[in-house]
Image: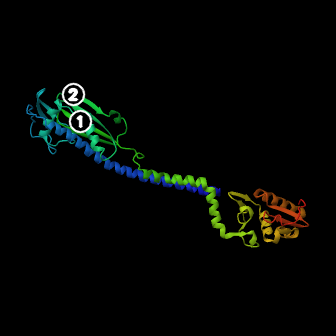
Amino acid sequence: MKKYIVPIIAIISCLCITIGYVTHLHRNYEAQKVAWNTIAQETFREALLAEVNKRLEILISHYRSEEAGALPTKRSLPDSVQIMSRGYGSRWYKLDKKRFERQLIEGGSVNSAISALIDEYPYSVDALKHRWDSLLNRKLRATTAIRYVLTDLGEYRDTTFANRDYFVYPIDSSLVSYIGYRCEAEFIGCVHYPSLWGACSPLNWALLLLPVLLLALILIYYPQISAAIRRRFIKKEIVHVADAPIERAKVYQLPDGMLFDVMAHSIRKGNETFKLSPQSVVLLKLFLRNPDRKVSVEEMNRELWEGKAAKGRMEVAVSRFRAELKKASPHLKVDYLNGVYQLKMPHFIEENTLVSNGK
């Protein structure tokens, strides 16, 4: 289980960093949308005013428009207004106070004149959208759509769209404005901003993918990293075989890059770990401490069993010891001759003249 601790910690850390950074990006994105909504509203109003100004340039001397009572203002609005037109004569029209709050033009006389003009010179919703896009795209990236509802002096409604499909999707910002009192034009503009991921800059993407990349590298190269860390931290504790005997040594450096870790009861070779039984740990320490790696039967018996073990019991212990060493390296061998066991390792096998008798 211990070997999985570092990868698990790395995965959890990567998730925490990624979630934290995504949360930070989302908060910034929501703050940006507030600023974008202000820009969208300003440009929408600017585009509408440009269309109104075009119509105010039209001569309206052949129209006569009157209102009942005082002209409506933002502070005072009558319940109805009387408008005289060429097509419908003089008629009274009720005013919607909620709509009046969103009137583009505050002046009552101007709105009356515009009401007369709209009936004969309707707005082009496509031209309005083109003007809005040209103003908006100078400041931010967004997709726009407009719904234009015209209620004429006969109180008939006609609805046209620019980019109608975008009214189906969730709208990031909806803008509503009205022009005229009767023969009334209602404009609803909707804005779709880039998604959170679409709004991310290359730097944002780099910072977002960096923890994932680091995690992948850690998982791929973890064995090598782990081995390097172990070598660094246990370097001072390693005792080379040539420096033995050292009674309190915790780690011995064996041939072929192997490490005998006394405390962990194991032999490490690269990324592999070979466990040793407690008796094998005692035997290996005993061999490493003795000159020429030789241990007599009496010394082995005294070290393991205080001199009370039978011969068969020692042979079983040595047989297990040989099998455990063979798993770590075929070059580690234990030979027996004339009551003496000897541990043979690659760098001195040829120098030793003991011959195994099969024990």
- The residue sitting at the front extreme is 350
> Does dot 2 land on a helix, a strand or a loop?
loop
In the rendered structure, the answer to whether residue 311 lies left or right of residue 37 reads right
Q: Are marks 2 and 1 in contact (CB under 8 Å)?
A: no
| Amino acid of disc 2 | Tyr
Of the two numbered discs 2 and 1 on the same chain, state the one appearing first in sequence.
2
Q: Position of residue 11 (x, y in %)?
A: 55, 53
Q: Position of residue 194 (x, y in %)?
A: 38, 44
Which residue is the site of mark 1?
186
In the rendered structure, the answer to whether residue 221 lies left or right of residue 165 reads right
Above or below: residue 124 compared with residue 287: above
Q: Position of residue 149 (x, y in %)?
A: 25, 33
The picture quadrant where one finds residue 99 is top left
Residue at image location 59% in from the left, 53% down from the top: 219
In the rendered structure, the answer to whether residue 200 lies left or right of residue 34 reads right
Above or below: residue 30 compared with residue 121: below
Q: Nearer the viewer, residue 262 or 129?
A: 129
**Distance from Cα at disc 2 to Cα at disc 1:** 13 Å
Q: Nearer the viewer, residue 91 or 113?
A: 113
Which residue is the site of mark 2?
156
Q: Neighbour class for label 2 at 10 Å: few (<14), some, many (≥20)?
A: few
Q: Position of residue 30 (x, y in %)?
A: 37, 49
Residue at image location 32% in from the left, 47% down from the top: 36
Q: Which mark is residue 300?
A: none
Determine if residue 78 is in view.
Answer: no
Residue at image location 35% in from the left, 36% down from the top: 166
Quadrant containing the N terminus in the rendered view: bottom right
Q: Nearer the viewer, residue 266 or 338?
A: 338
| Amino acid of disc 1 | Glu
Above or below: residue 11 compared with residue 66: below
Q: Neighbour class for label 1 at 10 Å: few (<14), some, many (≥20)?
A: many
